[in-house]
Structures are given as C-alpha cells and as structure tokens.
Amino acid sequence: MPLPTTPSEQFLTGLPKAELHLHVEGTLEPDLKLRLAQRNGIDIGQHTVEEVQATYQFHDLASFLAVYYPAMNVLVTEQDFYDLADAYFAKAATQGVRRVEMFFDPQAHTSRGIDFATVIDGYSRAAYDAEQRHGIDAELIMCFLRDHSAESARDTLEQALPHRHKLLGVGLDSDERGNPPEKFAAVFARARENGLKLTMHCDIDQDNTVEHIRQVIDDIQVDRIDHGTNIVEDPALVKKVRDAGLGLTCCPMSNSFVTDDMKAHEILNLLHEGVKVTVNSDDPAYFGGYIADNYSAFARATGASSSDMVDLARHSFEVSWVSAEKKEEYIAELTAYVDSYHEN
C-alpha cells in the first residue's frame, strides 16, 4: 500500500529508528527527580511534581545548563543511574527506537563526589538489560564537559579506560562559548588510539560556529557531528560532509528552546542535498518531546513527506556505530515496516 504524502503521527511513532543524540541526564522527568530526591533524603526545595516541573524554565543554552546540572544532584547511587537510563529506554521503546547511542556526563557527577564506577556501572547495566527489557540495542558515549579544562577531560578519559568495554565512543558537550573543539584535540586523539569513536557538539548559532564545524571535520576528524546545522552557512563544508557520508544528529525541538528557531527547514534542505542528517530528542524531559515527538514536530514545521521521514530514519541507522550486518538488519526492518504499513 503506498504511503500517504503527509506522514501521520501514528506512522512516525512506529517508524523504526535509532536515537543518536540523547543525553540520559536530560531524560530526568520531574516525577523521577522527586522520587530520587525522596529516596536519597535530598531537599530540592520542591515537594510536588508540579513544583519540580515549574523549575524547568530557560530561554537559551546558558540558562538551560543552569537548570540542568543542579537537577543531577538527586543521582547518588548506582541504582539511581540505572533507574534513570531504564526509564528512558522504556519510553523510547514506545516511540519506535531500536538502537540508542546514549550520551552521559561523568564529570557532572564526579565533580560532586560520585565515583566514576558508580556512574558507568549503573548506566552500562541498564544498557545491557535494555535488549531483554525493552527490545532496544543500547551503547554508551561518554561526553566531556567543554567548559571544564582539557586536563579534566584527560583525567576523565584515564578513569574511563579500565571500563573501555562499556563504551562505544566519546563526545563533547556543554557550553561552547570560548571552548572550541581544538581545546580537546589531544584528549580525542588518545580516545581514538584506544578504539573509541568520536563525536562533538557544534551547537546552533554559537560564536564561531562554522569554524568549530571546520575544526571537528578537518582537525579532530570526528566520526559524526552533533547538531551542526549551521553548516548551511558554508557550502564547501556541506559538500565535504556529504561526500564523506558524515552524519549530523539534529534536534529540532531543543533548537527552538535555545534559539528562536527549530532550524527545521535548514535540516530538510540538508536532507534534500544528500547530507545524512538525523532527528533526535537531545534532552526530552526539558524540551517537551521524545524522538517521535521530534519527528512529528519536524514534519509539521516543514511539510516533509513520508518519504523524507523514512530517509531520516534510514540515515539514523546508516550513521550509527553498529556493524554493517546490524545496519542491514535494521534497514530491512524499516523497509518491511514501510512496505506493510496501513493506518488503523
């Protein structure tokens, strides 16, 4: 049965997809935050879910981070980290997610006295259980906080190397102002030497954003770029990522919170130019939508066709860091879904 030109929410929710830009700490929903605070005897200053929800207010990247990091204080034990990741996997399973390559920020926890092993053991145990519990293949990407020093990133990598088998890759996130990719070149080179994949955030509409994108492509030589939508400002860079098949992990709904624009039309234009853009949810507890919500919001904003949305889902598997064999399996599942789809 041919697909309708305009994709429905039902179609987009069930569409098999990979999530490649997801901060697990950004999935801390108000009810879980309150429950963990109570479990750990932490006074967060709120006593109802509604009161916690009211604190999730921000207008740009800096104000978001000012809310985001203090919220993590409720994460104390290995079980807390497990429960946070497991709650995300349960939600993702209802949104067509088959594969997750999930960011986590160890420095946000070790800097407040939590052992590195507590963090990674909780998350990795949840990722290991995700296949059986939720039908999701999950792996971890450890991010460095770019507003910390390069020395702190190096020390974090050294802490991580004994846990190398629990990691898929490394990334770079947090406040980009004054913290260019080149600041962390040596740390990322060491990560690559140890067999880890590389990705870096190039957040939208930041100072020197196009130069930062150039650095991650030419100097760091990442395997993927997170956000990166401002690449449209440099056609030569667009051609370079297209020719290399380098993936961009875009997040429409979060874009509209940290700037005044989803950048949806830029993402669609990149898609039509042959760039392997993907759509993801970033920090869904804060930005009001998980991955299927982002697919739907993107389609509404752009008028993207069902075929466009299938291409986005296909790209998510193509630029994921799974084996070629697994990619073929996921794309076969996607093709079967599209071929047999009909509205209820």
Image (spheres, rainbow, N blue to C red):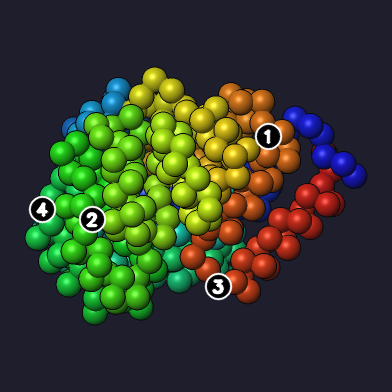
Which labelled disc corresponds to residue 323?
Answer: 3
Q: Earlier in the sequence, mark 2 or mark 3?
A: 2
Asked whether 255 or 274 is in front, the reply is 274
Question: Which quadrant of the figure contains the C terminus?
Answer: top right
Q: Earlier in the sequence, mark 2 or mark 1?
A: 1
Which labelled disc corresponds to residue 28?
Answer: none
Q: Position of residue 38 (x, y in %)?
A: 25, 46
The kind of residue tagged 3 is Ser
Could you tell me which residue is drawn at 71 percent across and 56 percent down? 334
Figure check: 145 above or below 228 = below
Residue marked by disc 4: 149
The kind of residue tagged 1 is Glu
Residue marked by disc 1: 9
C-alpha span from label 3 to label 1: 30 Å
Could you tell me which residue is drawn at 24 percent across and 31 percent down? 207
Left of 166 or right of it: where is 153? left
Q: Secondary structure at mark 1?
A: helix
Q: Position of residue 134 (x, y in %)?
A: 56, 61
The kind of residue tagged 2 is Phe
Q: Position of residue 229 (x, y in %)?
A: 43, 37
Residue marked by disc 2: 144
